[in-house]
Amino acid sequence: MPTCPAPVRRLDPDAVTELTATAAELLDLHGSATSPALLADLPGACARLGEPLRHRLRPVDTADGLFVLRGLTVDDTRLGPTPGHWSTVGDAGALWDVALLLVSALMGTPIAWDGQQDGRFVHNIVPSPGHESEQTGASSSVLLAPHTEDAFHPGRAHLLLLCCMRNHDNIATTAASVRLADLSAADVEQLKRPVAPILPDDAYEQARKFDGRPAPVPTLFETPEGLTMRYDPAYTPLEEADGTWREAYGRLGAELARVSVAVSLEPGDVLVVDNDLVVHGRVPFRARYDGTDRWLKRASVRVEHRPTRPAAEHDEHGYGQAALTAWPTSSASSA
């Protein structure tokens, strides 16, 4: 896998000051990054931000399907130790939660999940003891396989944001865009067929107990702008599919591996990923659990009226999981 520099959008010092000062004001006013009143204030706060900053924080707009927002800085000495589990983070890095929410709100509507990390709109991604070999963000010792974020759900994010708090070991996030893959027309047609379901991952304990019948979903979808993708091989029961489809699925995986890049985030970097175009993962690493391990913050964003998904997704049950929005929108919570 090549270590390839991702497209970078750099914030100038004035933009950094504007963003962080606005985040600090919101945090001071509401006292907590998880305050519902703070979430409700995000659109108004975004409207006061200047046009140069708003332009830098526009959504992804290239076939790469990603970019790194650079220019923010994190003071490692003031951050505190990397927690051993998301539930013990408390208010650590709360300013960055709010800054990430502002970035998210400029790109669309932040969403959360009732069944993950207590419904928080910003998740903390840290290695956790006992979860080393899982296919979740809490793992470390295994390759986190390339996947669409929350691929099991019709209400999954259109954009995924990963903000680096700490990464002393230069652990890389992997990413691959379907629009850079070289796929035959026959394979595309195969993978547009709804053949196999995508099951909830291990981070969704309630969803994995859902007793509804899993429905097969298409892997690829054609739009006027090009292909989009819904892909999570670690949670796709491939044995339920026919051989021709499995072969096409395997060739898609090989192409995604071929075009995959490794992005090593620096503290303060925000990786913005188009979740309809790009699968992401992470290389294996050895967690120390000594307070210095890799620490990311994650936000999910929905962009309304985006024609990147089949209309049939609206009929899916979502394994009983509801996507929560930071403020009311015209979209249903489950699609």
Image: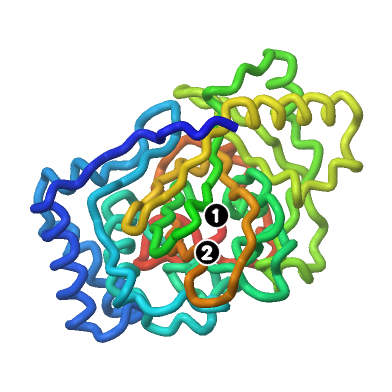
Along the line of sight, which residue is nearer the eye, 174 or 179? 174
Q: Which residue is mark 2?
A: 323
The quarter of the picture where residue 31 lies is bottom left
For the point 48% across and 52% down, which residue is it? 170
Q: Residues within 10 Å of mark 1 (few under 14, many from 20)?
A: many
Q: Position of residue 108 (x, y in %)?
A: 34, 52
Tell me the quadrant of the picture where the N terminus can be found. top right
Q: Amino acid at mark 1?
A: Gly
- What is the image's colouring? rainbow
Callout 1 secondary element: loop
Residue at 83% across / 25% down in the picture?
A: 247
The crowd level at tag 2 (other Cα within 10 Å; few <14, some 14-19, many 20+) is many
The image quarter containing residue 33 is bottom left
Q: Is residue 266 above or below residue 21?
A: above
Q: Is residue 155 left or right of residue 18?
A: right
- Which residue is found at the position 46% from the left and 41% from the top? 274
Residue 199 vertical placement versus 85 (above, below):
above
Can residue 118 be seen by looking at this rendering?
no
Residue 196 located left or right of residue 305: right
Please tell me in which quadrant of the rendered image residue 16 appears: bottom left
Quarter of the image where the C terminus is located: bottom right
Residue 58 vs 89, above or below: the answer is above
In the image, 207 versus 268, the foreground residue is 268
Q: Is residue 100 visible?
A: yes
Q: Amino acid at mark 2?
A: Ala
Labels 2 and 1: the sequence-earlier one: 1
Residue located beneath label 1 in the image: 155
Disc 2, SS: strand
Q: CA distance from mark 2 to mark 1?
A: 6 Å
Q: Are marks 2 and 1 in contact (CB under 8 Å)?
A: yes
